[in-house]
Amino acid sequence: MTQTDNPTVRLKIERRSNHPWIFQKMVEKPAAKPRPGSVVEIIDATGAWVGRGFYNGHSRISLRVLTADPDEAIDQAWFSAKVARAVELRRELLKLDEVSNGWRVFHSEGDGISGLVVDRYDDLLVVEFFSAGAFRHREWIYAALREQFPGCRFYSFAEDHVQKQESFDFRAPEAPEPALITEHGVKFRASPGSGHKTGFFADQRDNREYLSRFCAGKRVLDLCCNSGGFALYAAVRGASEVVGVDLDEEILAIAKQNARLNNVRPRFVQADLFPWLRDAANAGERYDVVVLDPAKMTRDREQVIPALKKYLDMNKLALSVVAPGGLFASFSCTGLVSEEQFLDMIRRAAFYAGRDVQVLRVAGAGADHPFMAHVGESRYLKAVVCRVF
């Protein structure tokens, strides 16, 4: 067993799980409290060594296990190897460089470092911290990323609710110059730090490409269009008419810039989708392809039922403007809502809308967003493509 100077933290329970999260109520408070994000040795209630990982006594997730191998040290070389393996998956196996210069580099537990997400937009790497452990070891993480992306730029941030939960303070730097990315031949300007998180959602790449195959010559409606992803694909692939709707004026300005990059002219509308859809349905408007991709509804388990109710209301209205025989693509990035719950919500929305829905495809995020079989929490995106009658 590798000898370390790491503090030791004991569990109140016998460790009988390989899930990397160990919650506060299962952990004894150490007499000498390690700083949030420190690497510690983990001993269970039987006295057995069970792992090595990040400790944060302030967080509901007090321990994030990084290894159960006693001979594996959590040092700079370990971080370097983890990042290298993640990049190898994207470049060598998935061959994403042939498709895009914008993809997820590292996906938290799915790639082995709990609380770390990294997205690549050409030479710009956007690093998001979800745990005190990832934040505390950020210089090692940056060094590991530079090894894989020489000359890269960084933009790092952590959302306010994460900093509060994880007890660290991090003020994001000024927004960097936007990066230009190409995805299946469609161009986007990614603008992280503009109030829109990473500035672009690479997780929908495969879903954008799939849906665009059905858009040539069609009327397409992209609801919650954000920076124009689905709308732009549809326009580039020859849709006869494309309308994008979003409430956020700032993100629509980016969507219009993206349209100019691709020499296409979708119509972008700033509106609340509920009254807009009601007016469209009452006016008899029907679209051949309708996309509904709202923002995350909740992070609170107590709010899952209200979130599903809002999804139901949105989907019912969206279904009302799908032309008979048309396609409807509905998405949820709320991780707390399961695929089963989401499909049942679509069933109920179809019933209340008086439509028959034929499910053609159930999918999720692209393969650059992997999740471990024993850590389903890393899987969040639900994608359902239907034909509507």
Image: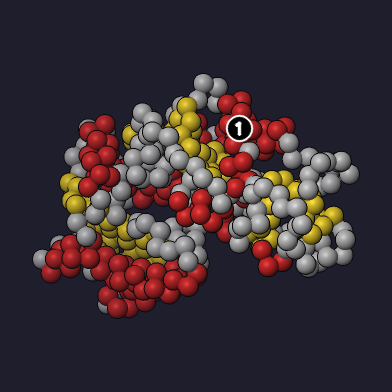
Residue depicted at 61% across the width and 57% down the height: 58
**Residue tagged by mark 1?**
139
Q: Residue furthest top?
A: 151
Residue depicted at 55% across the width and 47% down the height: 168
Q: Is residue 233 above or below residue 331?
A: above
Instruction: Specify few, some or many for label 1: CA neighbours under 10 Å numbering under 14, 14-19, or 20 or more.
Output: few
Picture coordinates of residue 370, whole percent (x, y): 58, 49
Picture coordinates of residue 3, whole percent (x, y): 87, 41
Along the line of sight, which residue is nearer the eye, 154 or 328? 154
Picture coordinates of residue 161, whole percent (x, y): 47, 55
Q: Is residue 16 visible?
A: no
Q: Amino acid at mark 1?
A: Glu
Q: Is residue 146 left or right of residue 13?
A: left
Which image quadrant is residue 343 in?
bottom left
Residue depicted at 27% across the width and 65% down the height: 318
Q: Is residue 245 visible?
A: yes
In the rendered picture of this protein, how many numbered marks are placed on residues?
Answer: 1
Q: Is residue 329 left or right of residue 122?
A: left
Along the line of sight, which residue is nearer the eye, 60 or 110? 60
Structure colour scheme = secondary structure
Which image quadrant is residue 351 in?
bottom left
Picture coordinates of residue 55, whole percent (x, y): 68, 52
Q: Quadrant of the C terminus?
A: bottom left
Q: Is residue 267 above or below residue 142?
A: below
